[in-house]
Structures are given as structure tokens and as C-alpha cells.
Amino acid sequence: KNEVEQSPQNLTAQEGEFITINCSYSVGISALHWLQQHPGGGIVSLFMLSSGKKKHGRLIATINIQEKHSSLHITASHPRDSAVYICAVSYPSFNQFYFGTGTSLTVIP
Amino acid sequence: EPEVTQTPSHQVTQMGQEVILRCVPISNHLYFYWYRQILGQKVEFLVSFYNNEISEKSEIFDDQFSVERPDGSNFTLKIRSTKLEDSAMYFCASSQDRGETQYFGPGTRLLVL
């Protein structure tokens, strides 16, 4: 079974803190995706990674293919970063995403 | 910026009734998807659609579900006879190519009473 695990499940941080969310998966993938789900439910794609590292503003995503692990970092966190962050993977043979359970982030002013 | 749209945003229906959830994918995208998220649970894949036919479906996507692209812009999910356990948020997504970034609609929250 294609398992995608995230940690932590819940995270509370003070504004300005550096945040790390982790994702691990069980079998080889074609790409890993980080998504943000807003409190209202909408889902926004943040990154698609197949190797290395990507940066967009205060968000950085890394992936280690050998260790089957990815991290999402948020620098200088802000209350507007409060959301659920979801890791999802895609495989060469299957045209769908397999989702993790998400990490609920709350950033306190 | 182009976006995926979904209607309605909320739907309440009686058990056993048919519902149709509508989506307008991004216009130059070729792959379309439906996902669902039961309250408090993770997002689950239902079906993918390409070239006017289903390309993959999950075990959740049984005979009560169907998808259609009735014209050049809409992509619909029909649930023939709704059950209480169909209550969930349903997301439509589209991508330009297989395996590429998927763009999600805002979702339709379905409540079956």
C-alpha cells in the first residue's frame, strides 16, 4: 500500500519562528507535492518536487529521494500561514495523488 | 490567473436522491480529477479523466458514481443515490499533463440527510 506519513499532526508556533513539517513515503515516487488547505477548505498547490530543493518566498521544500523523505520549511512564520499543510505523492504508474493526513499549523501573534 | 471553479459551494440533499456536482477546469488542461474529503479525514482520490474517458478510479468510485464532460468546459460528478456516508467535501482538480501540478477548485460541501 502507498503510505504517506506526515509529522507532526499539529503544530503551534509563535510568530517569527522557523517551522518544519516532515513527510515520508514508502515506495519510489515520480513527484512529491506540498499543498496548503485553508480553513475554509480550499486547496492550493505550493510545490512539486522530484529532487533537490525549491524556494518560494518564505517557503522552502526539500526532498531526499534515497531516504524517501521531504520537509517543508516556513521562515519567519506569520499568523496568515495558519493552515493545514498536506504532503501528496504521485507515482509513474498511477495518475492520482496519494495524500498524507496533513499537519495543522497555528501561528500565534 | 486561471482557476478551477466548482458549483454549488454547498449542497444539502436527502438520502437516496441524485446529486450532480459541477466543475469548470482550467481551459487548456487535459486531465481532470475528483477527490473527496470526509470531515476530519484526509483527501481521497475518486477518479481521473482524460480524453473523454475514465483513466483511473479508486475503490470508492463504485457504480453509484459517474463522471461526464458534457461540453467543452464542464466536468461533472454524479452520485446516483446518495448515502449518509457520501457527506464530504468534493474537490475537482485539473492538470495540463499527466503527473503535473494539479490545480484544485474550492470544493463543494455535500451534506446528505
Image: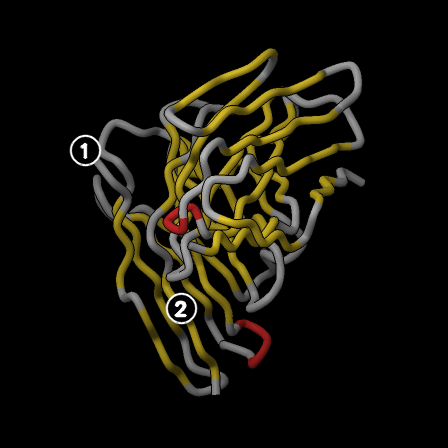
Query: In this orientation, which residue lies closer to the viewer: B41 or B69?
Result: B41
Judged left or right of residue B28, residue B99 is right
Of labels 2 and 1, the one closer to you: 1
Question: Contact (CB < 8 A) between labels 2 and 1?
Answer: no
Quadrant where the image shows the N terminus of chain A: top right
**To which chain does the residue with label 1 belong?**
B
Residue sitting at 35 percent across and 29 percent down? B30
**What is the x, y in percent for residue A88?**
59, 37
In the image, is residue A13 above or below residue B78? above
Residue sitting at 37 percent across and 81 percent down? B12
| Mark 2 residue type | Arg
Q: Pick out the residue farthest to the top.
A: A52
Disc 2: CA contacts within 10 A as few (<14), some (14-19) or many (>=20): many
Judged left or right of residue B72, residue B30 is right
In the image, is residue A5 above or below residue A55? below
Residue B105 seen in this snapshot:
yes
Residue sitting at 18 percent across and 33 percent down? B1
Residue under numbered circle 2: B109
Q: Are marks 2 and 1 on the same chain?
A: yes
Residue B43 seen in this snapshot:
no
**To which chain does the residue with label 2 belong?**
B
Residue sitting at 48 percent across and 52 percent down? A107
SS category of the residue bearing label 2: strand
Q: Total of numbered circles in the picture?
A: 2
Judged left or right of residue A49, residue A91 is right
| Mark 1 residue type | Glu
Residue under numbered circle 1: B1
**What is the x, y in percent for residue A60?**
51, 24
Query: In this orientation, which residue lies closer to the viewer: B88 or A8?
Result: A8
**What is the x, y in percent for residue A38?**
41, 53
Query: In this orientation, which residue lies closer to the viewer: B83 or A49?
Result: A49
